Image: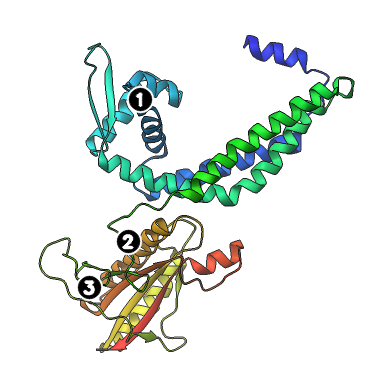
Amino acid sequence: MTRYNRTVRQTRTRRVDYAALAEWRYQLRLLISRRETAARAAGIEPQQYVLLLQLKGLQDGGAVTIGKLAERLQIQHHSAVELVDRLVERRMVARRRDDRDRRQVVVTLRPAGEAVLRRLALYSLAELRTEAPSLLATLRRLVRSANGSRAVNDTPRRRGAMKATALVVQGLLLVGLAAGCAMTPATTTTATPSPDGTAMTGPSGSRMDGSTRQAAAGGSTTRVPIASFRPAVAGTLNDIHFDFDRYELSSEATQMLDANAEWLKANPKSLLLIEGHADERGTVAYNLALGERRAKSTQNYLAAHGIQSGRVSIVSYGEERPQCSDHTEDCWAKNRRAHFMVKAQ
């Protein structure tokens, strides 16, 4: 509060660029909202992701205690305990008493938590590549407003400080961008690309990636050749579309699937291939996994409406086969889809 009062007194005559400040807060909120949506899509809560991130970032500096995590997340100690409890239950972190101070509880990252964290971190860095230009532009505007609003103090020294501040801000963001470009996507078992660039799941739920893989439930797997599938006749099996970073079916999508299910029931000799697609935002690995979830949710809906699972295979292409190549919201919406291919039994 003392710092706040001192700052207000010192800057009372300064002009405030409310438009730039409002835009900056909006962009930050948008950035955080996208990360929160991605965390939930990965199966964890946003605060759990932040805790995993802080844990990973702090671990090289020595033992990470619950108290230190509470400080980094700016939450109460008991709230940090609850977050850690939930992650322990999910086998993402482990905890133990500190060897030197038994009053302290040390938290460590487990492989399951590190795998989820890496996927989300890579997604976040990939998103930053598209978000950075507007963030930088707004930051530069705010720095100019904060450092250059009083002409009487606009000395060469002040102008130098203003330029240095702007360079530091840009440097911090560009470090993140460089890391995003340099890092390679994590290899995941849920969306491994095959030689033709696809991740394949057969009717039994087994994975196909160009070689035979063991089914999750045990037993043998069979390859599902997809070259023989062809696009359905126009007007018979229509694509469905998904919201950004989601794989849940909308009411419009379910209505379309109801019609598709009727066609499949009327053509019992037709086998179905469901292709899952994503837009270009996010990492290749993340979008392959997202495309597979979209195809799987589509398959599950059809199975619940009388279409035998033995007739249906799914494949994920992620972002690799866009329907539209423009970098716009309308185009991305077209690419977030499940597409249907058929062949005779």
Residue 83 occupies which quadrant of the picture? top left
Which residue type does callout 2 highlight? Ala
Instruction: Say which label, 3 or 1, has the lower sequence index.
Output: 1
Q: Residues within 10 Å of mark 1 (few under 14, many from 20)?
A: many
Cα gap from disc 2 to disc 1, whole angstroms:
33 Å
- At a point 43% along the width and 57% down the height, the residue shown is 246
Residue for badge 1? 80
**What residue is drawn where x is 64% and y is 43%?**
135
Q: Report if the CB atoms under discs 3 and 1 are less than 8 Å apart.
A: no
Q: Amino acid at mark 3?
A: Pro
Q: Which residue is mark 2?
A: 191
Residue 190 sits in quarter: bottom left
Disc sitting over residue 93 in the figure? none
Decide if residue 115 is on the left or right side of residue 144: left
Q: Is residue 331 left or right of residue 298?
A: right
Residue 248 visible in the shown view: no
Residue 253 appears at what percent x and percent y? 43, 69
Residue kind at label 1, given as amino acid type: Ala
| Residue 333 spot, x, y in % from top left | 54, 65
- State which quarter of the image contains the N terminus: top right
What residue did someone put label 3 on?
A: 203
- Does residue 145 lie above or below 34 as drawn? above
Query: Secondary structure under badge 3?
Result: loop
Label 3 or label 2, whichever comes before in sequence order = 2
